[in-house]
Amino acid sequence: MGDILVVEDDTALRGALVAVLGSAGYSVLEAADGTAALAVLRDRSVSLVLTDIQMAPMDGYTLLGEIKRQWPQVPVVMMTAYGDISRAVQAVREGASHYLTKPFDLDILLGEVARFKRNACDADAGLQSPGLRDLYALAQRVAASDATVLINGESGVGKEVLARFIHATSKRSGRPFVAINCAAIPDNLLESTLFGHEKGAFTGAASAHAGKFEQADSGTLLLDEVSELPLPLQAKLLRALQEREVERVGGARPIPVDIRVLATSNRDMLQHVADGQFREDLYYRLNVFPLTVPPLRERIDDVVFLGTEFLHRHDARAAFAACALAALRAHQWPGNVRELANVIQRATILAPGLEIKAEHLMLPAAALARTTGPTPPADAPQDAAATSDLRSLERRAVLDALQATGGNRKQAADKLGMPERTLRHKLAKWRSEGLIDDAG
């Protein structure tokens, strides 16, 4: 979906960043300052901007403002020195996706790049996928309003990707997008995380802290997995949504906030309300405009479309064999798009060449059996049959990797993503069981 643009006036650091990102498989463009970066953005398709803050003649803050005005869908990650953290936080409030404090660990850099580039690419794929076109068209219409949206769907279907799309196509696109996973934060920290706290409000509160509501002021707040909020906190959330103001923990005055709220859930919310686990009044406050992302098993045409998208992100020359396409269509995808992305990544590791076959997908035996031949005898234990089939697929993948590397075990192990010692152990075990000959 476009290149990564690195904007840095330090030539040595810019060169190092370009080299690191290039070695990770990304297509990278570079610019020495904000003015040069804008020229690049006008000429090329860019999916992520990684920019320094202190530059001349145009600094990173000015560049951020121009990007949010002209290309609001492009995420921007700021790089800042330790002393400029407060300004970087302000930049996030003004539309930056995130900031990194120099010097930063390269693994953190690559993780952030993968995160924001993936979100951008996945939203683009959602717009084009046959099963989601109508949903994204509806989302684009609701994005024009400030209506609260509740996005429902199973885990892994892409609810956050849809939420980010709504923000990116809304009038708030140049403002902050702040997401909080309500299921991932301990209950005793959730109130402070959402609403902030004042200095001395509790043990360890050494300074005042703005919560997620304040951080999202003038932008969009995503309450991811909102159904997991504890009941006592739901009342305070309801008031914040009704009044559009929050009170920090230990605070004495309400703080007004101008935000658009999006929420997601993988539960049956009406049943959750009936079970007494979620307030009915809060449910209706969130469910102003409901959107449901269907599971992947209900949009089989998307399996091949998205699978091809993921495959080409690894290697644009790669392709699926007919047997692999059949296996992709036959699988039920309980993990939805997240599972599909993992399966494709695994297949690119296991395949010795550019053709992805069914065995490289390493799908459960049930999916392969529907496409590759006879099923196990009725009296055969199902789990044993599946395990045997998976072991056969693993053995085939190892032998293919050895053949592709001319028998070089180290290279084969690297290709398979396993330690060489593990590869040697597997080969010895298979020889002892008579499953491969001594030449294998």
Image (spheres, grey):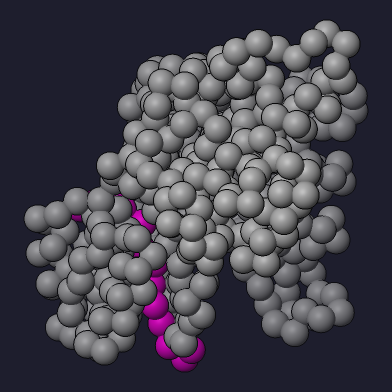
- Of 233 and 387, nearer the camera is 387
- Of 131 and 423, nearer the camera is 423
Look at the image and tell me whether residue 182 can be seen: no
Look at the image and tell me whether residue 109 can be seen: yes
Q: Position of residue 333 (x, y in %)?
A: 62, 26
Q: Is residue 286 above or below residue 58?
A: above
Q: Quadrant of the rendered structure where residue 5 is?
A: bottom left
Q: Is residue 89 above or below residue 418?
A: below
| Residue, far front | 438
Picture residue at 18% right of the left edge, 74% below the top: 31
For the magenta stretch, what is the residue range?
68-84
Q: Is residue 128 left or right of residue 346?
A: left
Picture residue at 38% right of the left edge, 18% below the top: 130
Picture residue at 74% right of the left edge, 80% below the top: 199
Q: Position of residue 183 (x, y in %)?
A: 75, 48
- Of 355 and 154, nearer the camera is 355
Residue 434 magenta-highlighted = no
Q: Is residue 377 above or below residue 150?
A: above
Picture residue at 41% right of the left edge, 21% below the top: 322
Residue 75 magenta-highlighted = yes
Q: Quadrant of the rendered structure where residue 304 is?
A: top left
Q: Position of residue 106 (x, y in %)?
A: 47, 77
Q: Is residue 396 left or right of residue 70?
A: right
- Of 330 and 271, nearer the camera is 330
**Tally of numbered tags:** 0
Q: Position of residue 388 (x, y in %)?
A: 75, 31
